[in-house]
Image (spheres, helix red, strand yellow):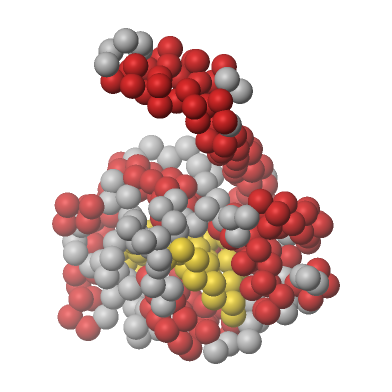
Amino acid sequence: MIDLAQIKQGQRRALAKAITLIESKLDRDREAAQGLLNQLLPATGKSIRVGITGVPGVGKSTFIEALGLFLIKQGKKVAVLAVDPSSPIRGGSILGDKTRMEKLSRETNAFIRPSPSEGALGGVAQKTRETMLLCEAAGYDVILVETVGVGQSEYQVAAMVDFFLVLMLPNAGDELQGIKRGIMELADALVINKHDGEHIHLAERTKSHYQNALHLMQQTHTWTPQVKTCSALENQGIDNVWKMVEEYEALCKGSGEFEAQRAQQNSKWLDTLIQEMLTLKLKNNLKVQTERPILQKAVLSNKITPYHAAKKIISLL
C-alpha cells in the first residue's frame, strides 16, 4: 500500500514505489496509479521542468550532476528523470544513471530515477509525465529530464517541459552537429559544454556561430533563445545557465505564457492518450483480431484499398 502522506512528506522510498506503480503495464496497477495521481493532483504543478538533450558524448550526465549539486546548494530539491535507451531486442536497459551521477545520488535533496524508454518516441519514457507529477507532489522544486539523444522525435521532450535546453560540443557548428533545424527552433537555450582547457577558443567560436544561426530564425516567443558556455567538468558557468532559466521563468510567468504553455501541453497529452487508448482497444478487440489478418491479406493482394480495410476495422468497434 502506498502512503499518500509519505509521498507529500518527500519520502523517497514511497515516491519510488509510486513510480514503479505508474510504470506497471498491468491493468489493475494502471487503475490504482491513476487513482493515486488524481488524489495528488492538487499538490502538483509547483516545480520548473527542464528538458536536457544533446548528442552522445556531450556530457549530459556530468552537466546534470553539476547543475543538480549547484541547485541543492541553493536550497532546492532536485529530481532527475534519466531516460535510458531500451534494447529493441530484449527490451532491457542499462539503468546506470546512479553510477554516472554518484555525488548527486548521495544528496538527501536529490532523487534520481532511471527509467527505460521502451522505444517511446523521443527517447522519453512513456510514463515520464506522470512521474513528473509525483515528484512535484513530493516537493521537488526542479525536475530535470535527461533524454536519450537528439533526433526529430525530441519534439516529445519539449512538449512536456517548461524549458528545453540543448547541450552542444565545441565544434564550431560542424554540420550543425546533426541537430536538425526543428530542434534548433524548439530550444530555449543552447549550452556549449566543455568550455575548458584547449577547447575554450573553439567553444567561443561555436557560441558565436550558433548565436548567428538563432538570430536568423524567426522568433514568435516572448523569450529569445540564448547561447551560453559552461564547463560541467570544472563546474564553471553552471550558475549562469541556471540564472538564464530563472530569467525565462520570471518572464514567461509575468506574461502569462508559462501557464498557457502548460495548459496546451495537457491538451496535447489528452489527445495522445485518446489515441493510445483507441489503439489498445483495437488491439484487444476479438472481432478485430479475427478480421484484421483477413483484411491485411486482401490489402497485400490488391483486393481492397488500405483505406477501406482500415474503415472496416474501425467499424468493428
Q: Tell me residue 240's x, y (percent).
A: 46, 72
User: Is residue 132 among the parts visible in the rendering?
Assistant: no
Q: Going by the image, does 43 lie left or right of 284?
A: right
The answer to which quarter of the image holds residue 310 is: top left
> For the point 32% across and 58% down, which residue is it?
89
Q: Tell me residue 44's x, y (percent).
A: 73, 59
Residue sitting nearer the eye, 85 or 165:
85
Which of the image's four quarters has the N terminus?
bottom right
Q: Going by the image, does 249 lie left or right of 294?
A: right
Q: Tell me residue 39's x, y (percent).
A: 81, 57
> For the point 47% across and 37% down, which residue is it?
220
- Compared with residue 272, is residue 187 higher up or lower down, i.e. above or below? below
Number of marks in the rendered image: 0
- Compared with residue 82, is residue 287 higher up or lower down, i.e. above or below? above
Residue sitting nearer the eye, 101 or 125:
125
Which of the image's four quarters has the C terminus?
top right
Q: Going by the image, does 145 lie left or right of 23?
A: left
User: Is residue 5 among the parts visible in the rendering?
Assistant: yes
Q: Tell me residue 79's x, y (percent).
A: 58, 72
> For the point 58% across and 66% down, which residue is it?
143
> For the point 50% across and 66% down, which residue is it?
115
- Compared with residue 75, is residue 248 higher up or lower down, i.e. above or below? above
